[in-house]
C-alpha cells in the first residue's frame, strides 16, 4: 500500500507571494526526491493553471478543488467544505483545511507552516483582510493542526507567545536557498540586462517600517563605502517609497537601483555582483535573502535579532543596537570594516559560505517526512 503525502501548492497557481511560491516549489521537489520507499507526493491546489504545477516533477497526482484560490481561501478561513479531503496533508503556509479530523482512526493529519510573524507584529503594514485571514487561520491551527512548522527556534518561541495553545505541536524545519543555487555563468550579461552596475551593496529590505530599509540605507550612507546600492524584491508601485528613503539617508539618486522579484538565475547573478549584503530588519521572519547570500559566500552584515543571531550565527557580522540611529551607525561601521580590505571581505565570505551549507531543502524534506511518520 502506498502512503501519500498531499502537499498544498496553491502558491504555484496564484503566486501572490513570490518567496512563498519558490519555497513551496523547492520543498515539493525535495519531498519527491526524498520520498521513502512506499511513499509518494500528491499536489493539492485550487482551480487554475496546470502548467505551474508542472515545475514539480515526479508528483503522484494533482488534486484540484472546485474553488479558485480566492474563494478557497475564504472557505478555509470559515472551516467549511473545500473538497480537499483528508489523508496526510502538508502545507508550506497556513493555506490548508484546518478542520476537525481523526488522526488515530482515520490516519488524517494536517501540518501547516508559519514563516513570518508580520500579521501579528506589524499588522498595520498589511491590508486588513490579509492580516485578519492569517490571524483567523492561526486560530484554526491552534484548534485543529497536528503540528505547526516554523523555520527557526526563535520563531518557535515567539509563536508560542502569540498562540500558547500550540504547546508542544510546534516543530522547527528551516528553509533554504533553491537547490543548486549558484552564480550563473552568464552573470555579467544578466546584470547588464537588469541595468545594474558591476560591484554594489545589496540591501535586503522593503519600504515597510519593520523591514528596516531606512536603517540599511542610512548605514550605507554613513559607512563611507562609495558603491552603488541595489534593493530587490520591491513590489510594483513601491519604487518611489524606496527612492524617498534613499534621499532621506543622503544617497544620491544615481547610486540607487531598485528591482522587483527576480527569478532564481537573475537573483544569483545579482548576488554574484554584490560586495556585501546588508540585512537591517529585526522582525520575526525567515531571512530568505540572507540565506541566499550565505549559500553563495557573500559577506553578510545584519542587524542582531533573535532570528538573525540563529540563522547567521558565526557566518556574518551581527550588529546590536537599542534604537534606529545606533543600528544605522553600527551597521555602517560593520560595513566599512567588512569592505575596508580585501582580506576582511574574503574572510567574511568564507565564513558565510561555511554557514550556508547548514541550509538544505533535501534535509528539510527529510525532516518533513519524519514529522509525518511521527504523527
Image (tube, grey):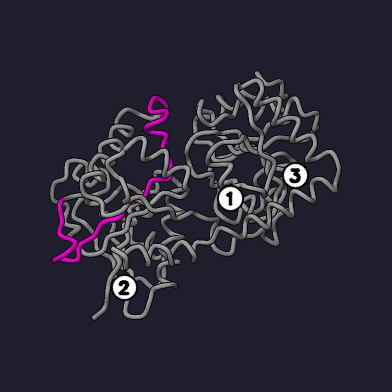
Distance from disc 1 to disc 2, alpha carbons, whole Å, reads 30 Å
Q: Residues within 10 Å of mark 3 (few under 14, many from 20)?
A: many
Q: Residues within 10 Å of mark 2 (few under 14, many from 20)?
A: some
Q: Secondary structure at mark 1?
A: helix
Distance from disc 1 to disc 3, alpha carbons, whole Å, reads 16 Å
In this rendering, the count of numbered labels is: 3
> Magenta stretch containing residue 126, yes or no?
no
- Comes first in the chain, label 1 or label 3: 3
Q: Which residue is disc 1 drawn over?
A: 291
Q: Which residue is found at the position 47% from the left and 37% from the top?
A: 284
**Of the pair 273 and 346, the residue shown nearer to us:** 346
Q: Which residue is disc 2 drawn over?
A: 60
- Comes first in the chain, label 1 or label 2: 2
Q: Is residue 288 left or right of residue 97?
A: right
> Magenta stretch containing residue 118, yes or no?
yes
Q: Is residue 55 visible?
A: no
Q: Nearer the viewer, mark 1 or mark 2?
A: 1
- Comes first in the chain, label 2 or label 3: 2
Magenta stretch? 100-125
Q: Which residue is disc 3 drawn over?
A: 275
User: What is the x, y in percent for residue 373?
Assistant: 32, 68
Marks 1,2: beta carbons within 8 A: no
Marks 2,3: beta carbons within 8 A: no
**Of the pair 54 and 354, the residue shown nearer to us:** 354
Amino acid at each position: 500500500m502506498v502512503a501519500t503525502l498531499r502537499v498544498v501548492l496553491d502558491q504555484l497557481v496564484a503566486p501572490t507571494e513570490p518567496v512563498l511560491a519558490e519555497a513551496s516549489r523547492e520543498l515539493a521537489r525535495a519531498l519527491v526526491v526524498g520520498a521513502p520507499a512506499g511513499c509518494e507526493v500528491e499536489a493539492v491546489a485550487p482551480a487554475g493553471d496546470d502548467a505551474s504545477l508542472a515545475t514539480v516533477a515526479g508528483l503522484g497526482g494533482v488534486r484540484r478543488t472546485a474553488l479558485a484560490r480566492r474563494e478557497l481561501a475564504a472557505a478555509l478561513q470559515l472551516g467549511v467544505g473545500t473538497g480537499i479531503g483528508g489523508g496526510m496533508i502538508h502545507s508550506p503556509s497556513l493555506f490548508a483545511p484546518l478542520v476537525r479530523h481523526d488522526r488515530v482512526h482515520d490516519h488524517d493529519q494536517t501540518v501547516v507552516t508559519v514563516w513570518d510573524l508580520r500579521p501579528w507584529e506589524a499588522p498595520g503594514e498589511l491590508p486588513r483582510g490579509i492580516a485578519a485571514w492569517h490571524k483567523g487561520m492561526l486560530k484554526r491551527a491552534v484548534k485543529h493542526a497536528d503540528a505547526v512548522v516554523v523555520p527557526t527556534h526563535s520563531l518557535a518561541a515567539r509563536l508560542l507567545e502569540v498562540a500558547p495553545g500550540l504547546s508542544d505541536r510546534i516543530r522547527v524545519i528551516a528553509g533554504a536557498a533553491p537547490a543548486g543555487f549558484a552564480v550563473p555563468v552568464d552573470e555579467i550579461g544578466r546584470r547588464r540586462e537588469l541595468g545594474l552596475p558591476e560591484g554594489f551593496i545589496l540591501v535586503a529590505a522593503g519600504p515597510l517600517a519593520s523591514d528596516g530599509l531606512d536603517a540599511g540605507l542610512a548605514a550605507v550612507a554613513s559607512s563611507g563605502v562609495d558603491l552603488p546600492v541595489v534593493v530587490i524584491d520591491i513590489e510594483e508601485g513601491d519604487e518611489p517609497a524606496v527612492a524617498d528613503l534613499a534621499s532621506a539617508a543622503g544617497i544620491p539618486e544615481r547610486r540607487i537601483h531598485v528591482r522587483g522579484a527576480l527569478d532564481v538565475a537573475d537573483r544569483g547573478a545579482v548576488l554574484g555582483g554584490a560586495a556585501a549584503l546588508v540585512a537591517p530588519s529585526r522582525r520575526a521572519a525567515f531571512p530568505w535573502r540572507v540565506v541566499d547570500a550565505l549559500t553563495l559566500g557573500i559577506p553578510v552584515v545584519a542587524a542582531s535579532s533573535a532570528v538573525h543571531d540563529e540563522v547567521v550565527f558565526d557566518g556574518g557580522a551581527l550588529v546590536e543596537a537599542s534604537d534606529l540611529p545606533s543600528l544605522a551607525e553600527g551597521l555602517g561601521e560593520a560595513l566599512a570594516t567588512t569592505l575596508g580590505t580585501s582580506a576582511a571581505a574574503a574572510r567574511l565570505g568564507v565564513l558565510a559560505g561555511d554557514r550556508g551549507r547548514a541550509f538544505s531543502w533535501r534535509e528539510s524534506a527529510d525532516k518533513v517526512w519524519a514529522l509525518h511518520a511521527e504523527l
